Image (tube, rainbow, N blue to C red):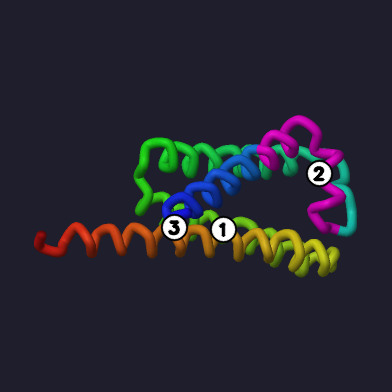
Amino acid sequence: MSLKNVNTVLATAVVLFTFYLGISFVLIPETQAPGFGLPNWPSGDGGGFLNVKGNRENAMGLAMGVLLVTGHRRALGWVLLMVAAAPFGDMITVLAHHGSMAAAFGVHGLTSVLIAVTGLLILRETSKAQEAAAQPA
């Protein structure tokens, strides 16, 4: 299997998982909140922030999905690197609020690393393609 195919599978998995999270946080936030890693359910109207997280996930999924479907692979690599900041920020948030270290590192940290590695692999793939195209025939 070529690097491009592996990268496409990884990027597709990231996009689909992002949509899964986004839709879940919008439609059934009470089932997603415990796995996020924070020690307490938001009080009062705080549950609305879970919908905000879902909307953020859906927007990121749309951006990545459009770049994947339209074949803008170099831009997709850069966007994946930027999107990796979101789960990293979630990890920091969970740690700062004395939440579950397992969720912080095992869920958010690993997700951030996976997304960043996928972005780097796509950037590597596209830089190799540019180098090959620049070589005289």
Mark 3 sits on what residue? 3
Q: Is residue 2 left or right of residue 86?
A: left
The residues colored magenta run 20-38
Mark 2 sits on what residue? 32
Q: Residues within 10 Å of mark 1 (few under 14, many from 20)?
A: many
Q: Is residue 112 left or right of residue 117?
A: right
Q: Nearer the viewer, mark 1 or mark 3?
A: 3
Measured as percent of width and height from the top left, residue 80 is found at 49, 55
**Which element carries disc 3, helix, strand or loop?**
helix
Amino acid carrying mark 3 in the image? Leu
Mark 1 sits on what residue? 115
Q: CA distance from mark 3 to mark 2?
A: 34 Å
**Closer to the camera in the image, 125 or 45:** 125
Q: Nearer the viewer, mark 3 or mark 2?
A: 3
85 w.r.t. 13: above or below: below
100 w.r.t. 33: above or below: below
Quick one: label 1 or label 2, which is nearer the N terminus?
2
The disc label shown at residue 46, or none? none
